[in-house]
């Protein structure tokens, strides 16, 4: 089949390459002419605008957006809108908020699929995990491409109606934060604890048969191999957090307790805050009632 | 090589079977004559006492204990002690506290290896992950058997001196609690949230390419397949907790924060406590300051 | 001075009574004619509609709303709007979200004060703590009434511009949740721990000189005195949660970690959820890897 | 009555002064001759050794220890032991672990009272809160002195048998950690949030009538008054933690969830750990799966 791909960053290029590899035709467009040219070299039909891409696709367009979540999606949809018909299918493969996806689905005549995409650039060869929301017929229509982009038929499914795909991806990311922090706590205790241990050996031993083996643990093993047993100069600063924040917000609305996911998110915030006010106050309060000495910043803190 | 195995429960039998499969000789003993007979049928040389097992092993004994952590280990070691020499090697493959293992290592003339074993009965075919502490020579001596019991050479390693094996296993289990709770929070939000979702499909889709794919997530998939989308009659009651408690205790001593591991352990305690006092007090305090109605047990709580 | 009071529930009546006691004039209105009549008996001038109340107040109206947060505030403001001028002052003494207060302040010609009110019905005699946001001149204008309703001049202050009063009150409530849970954890440990202890005696001893003495701890003492050492039939069910939820949402937006406030809120959610899915899954997973027996609901769970 | 006081630091001196003020006789001893002389100036009868103190007390000795928890208590008891009889009473007013107090009570012929003392040096004028464990007759015997040292009869009580006093004090401190952190989270959100707020004004307004008013909140008010709205140069470093650690350890043993107390303790550990390993690993893992840029320490972290 024929697929239009808009957005040719790392993730978009993987969609192009895997779709081409599976024998499909790809029309590719990116705001960067360079990125479009690179996709053309890989075998895609290059378009020089959204309009051009739509013309090259003809009727029954199938278009995959892989642009940054937020305004870029709305802007792209605005460009697409004049060219879309009821029988067309647009897939948003980015990390959009599920409510934005519901709103966008309602705002277009085309069928709109929200597709949570996990695996990241590191998964180029194995394929992604794709969580899709939206009309059943549109999902079925895209199956050949989904088979190509995912790890195969088992790596994608229709989660439910509009928004369900990005909803499941949002929760996936909340769980991801907590898993990373859980492994981190374990390795921190091992690194600071009473034995002199080799982190890479531990990660490798665990990855071969232990209950907690996982892809993230393989990435831990790789990190220790590449950065060293003490992680070298890797800083205590964890960026990101929007999907985790969305997960906690939804859990608040649903009144579902998610203490570990919240805790992992709080660690990220903490890693980016200098001199926590709460603890500075606690330091001072200990003087207040107990006349314990107050540590001052001049003391080298 | 020749290995004595004491303790022929589910885990001990896997040690026996995998060692026999790899072409080694096994002398097997269990307090249950039935279990010993079953091992004999599988190809092991049955012993009818610890003493008998020692005699059958001759000099340079290599003995693997797979008995319940605690008094059973000490009792078995007491029986073994008169028969042990400096060149013998005893492996404790159970879930002992690392400090008990250090004490036991100091209390015997034989070389003592503490071997954390992960993978559980479900891993019989793939082999275990084995984390070993104790004298280097003794570890090297056991490598042929470790290769057989583990998933292969990558599935075992010497973590360090005495106690290091059970120490690493203890932390493994703390991480395991947190991972289980992290997946649980995600699935709970999905189950209670605003979409009507298929848990097994989500777990399967994630297991094929998503960042959070893991063996535990495969077990989630299996659980939903076997128990149903709402987990059927599975109760809200999580047993166990000793290794998690040890992990938190050690983290307290090392002053390492492990909020997710603690949180997961607290959920287990919570699942076993009826009518939490803290929340009953909060209920009453809301009346105290705000005259909010107090829910009473007679109200059907 | 003359004050109009709309909303004569428990909290509104306290405003009326304390203002009358301080020698001011009160025009009172409630949708319930009965509540209005009761206020009249206490010395207020009864109005039979919002329009009537406005007419009785004349120019330079000062009006205190004590109606439930949400639609009731907007409905009352809609009734008031035709009668309001730039020199009038409207106070919202309820638990509104600070963003709603900012919106309402922008939507009226009158000066709008958002006034967080703490102390609850139990504080009728001592006076409330009042956190006020909005135009400085309007706050100054209301000081005589604020002195009367609060514990005195120290019990009220202008926190800042529009919304600041309800913002500070929102955070106050978040902290309140955490304090209640902190005391609750302490008393739960004492109640379940290894000594046979008298909770009321402990609370009383602490309230007389201990670092953790507080009004909430006095309410704990009262609760044990009135409900008994084991809290009798008080249920494990904590209602409420909106201001705590708002606090966590704002903390997410500001990227400020509030693990204790979140934890206390999660306990409330937990107290209202039967059979937590996360723990049911953990129960089942322990079978998955370790063949531990699965507790079933039929087992009496 | 006559009281011997051993240990004349800040807390011991308060015991001496309040007992003298109440008209009792005090025999005082400290390893520092200077401290003993200062107590003598205040009206106490100075002793130059533990033996001398015992001789001055005669029969039916009542002795109050206010020495640092740990070895100093055992050393003092060893010095006292040859002089103690069954009718003597020894009070340990320090922060000892309850199990140490049980052991010490069993190791002496005298009656041994473990007395948890709260209020700190700042409470010199108001009197302490005293939580006492041990034999009833010994507690009754000490009541006149307890009345003097506490805030009066309401400020002390017998909690139960040996150890109960220090047990209740241990839990008191666990709660104290959580309360401090709860206020800290609230003020942190206010300080980092969207309004420009005056912390001292907020604390004062809350302390006059709000639900969360407390002595700790008065100390917050004092802290902002003395250190400034942003706490000036107060460092993010919270010392201490042993009683909080004991509380969590006991809660683990009793299987009582104390997530807020644990969370507050973890914040202390966190404030003393540079460059958390867990978060450095999370930083690196985000590169692992998503090729997100790794922040390096050379980047100024």
Image: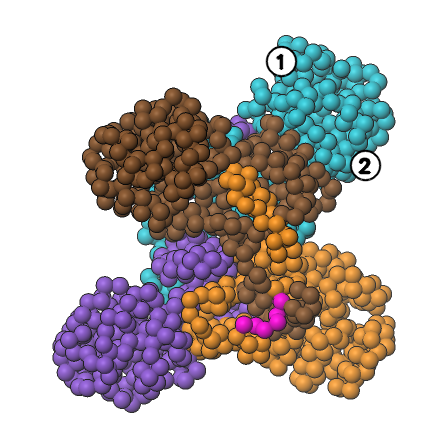
Chain colours: A orange, B purple, C cyan, D brown
Residue A284 x/y as whole percent: 58, 43
Q: What is the x, y in percent for residue D198?
A: 70, 38
- Graded by Cα atoms within 10 Å as few (under 14), some (14 to 19) or many (20 or more), the crowding at tag 2 reads few
Q: Which mark is residue B286?
A: none
**First-in-chain label (1 vs 2):** 1
- Percent coordinates x, y for residue B270 in the rendering: 41, 49
**From the image, which quarter does the N terminus of chain D lie in?**
top left
Q: Is residue A298 visible?
A: yes
Residue that carries the numbered disc 2 in the rendered image: C106
**Toward which corner of the image does residue A111 lie, by quadrant?**
bottom right
Describe residue D227's horizontal placement relative to residue A72 as left or right. left
User: Which one is in front in this view, the residue at disc 1 or the one at disc 2?
Assistant: 2
Along the viewing direction, whichever of D224 and D66 lies nearer the viewer: D66
In the displayed structure, C281 sits above or below C139; it is below
Secondary structure beneath disc 2? helix
Residue at point 57%, 24% (across, down): C123
Which region of the structure is painted magenta?
A: A230-235
Query: Splitting the image into 4 quarters, where does residue C231 fall?
Result: top left
User: In this rendering, do the residues under marks 1 and 2 share a single chain?
Assistant: yes
Q: Residue at x 62, y 47 (%)?
A: D234
**Magenta region, main secondary structure:** loop
Please give the residue where the numbered disc 1 appears in the rendered image. Answer: C38
Q: Is residue B53 above or below residue D34?
A: below
Residue B82: give x, y in percent of width and height: 15, 75
Spatial separation of the CA atoms under disc 1 and disc 2: 34 Å
Q: Is B98 inside the magenta-drawn segment? A: no
Residue A168 visible in the displayed image: no
Of residue D258 and residue A179, the one placed in the foreground of this image is D258
Query: In the depicted view, which residue is nearer to us: C274 or D142?
Result: D142
Q: Chain of mark 1?
A: C
The residue at 57%/61% (across/down) is D274
Q: Give the secondary structure at mark 1.
A: helix
């Amino acid at each position: 089949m024929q697929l239009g791909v808009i957005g040719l960053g790392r993730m978009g290029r993987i969609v192009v390459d895997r779709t081409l590899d599976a024998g499909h035709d790809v029309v590719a467009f990116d705001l960067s002419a360079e990125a479009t040219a690179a996709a053309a070299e890989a075998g895609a039909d290059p378009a020089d605008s959204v309009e051009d891409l739509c013309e090259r696709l003809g009727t029954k367009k199938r278009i995959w957006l892989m642009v940054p979540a937020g305004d870029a999606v709305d802007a792209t949809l605005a460009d697409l809108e004049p060219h879309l018909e009821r029988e067309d299918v647009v897939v948003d493969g980015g990390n959009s908020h599920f409510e934005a996806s519901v709103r966008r689905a309602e705002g277009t005549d085309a069928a709109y699929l929200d597709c949570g995409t996990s695996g990241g650039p590191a998964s180029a060869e194995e394929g992604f995990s794709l969580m899709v929301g939206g009309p059943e017929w549109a999902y079925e229509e895209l199956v050949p491409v989904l088979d190509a982009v995912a790890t195969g038929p088992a790596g994608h499914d229709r989660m439910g109606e509009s928004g369900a795909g990005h909803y499941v991806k949002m929760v996936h990311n909340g769980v991801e934060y907590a898993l990373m922090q859980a492994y981190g706590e374990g390795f921190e205790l091992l690194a600071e604890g009473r034995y002199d241990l080799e982190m890479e050996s531990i990660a490798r031993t665990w990855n071969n048969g232990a209950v907690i083996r996982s892809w993230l643990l393989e990435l831990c093993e790789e990190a220790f191999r590449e950065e060293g047993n003490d992680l070298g100069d890797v800083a205590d600063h964890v960026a990101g957090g929007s999907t985790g924040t969305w997960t906690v917000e939804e859990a608040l609305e649903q009144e579902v307790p998610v203490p570990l996911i919240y805790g992992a998110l709080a660690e990220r915030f903490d890693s980016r805050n200098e001199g926590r006010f709460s603890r500075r106050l606690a330091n001072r309060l200990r003087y207040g009632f107990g006349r314990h000495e107050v540590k001052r910043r001049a003391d080298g803190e």
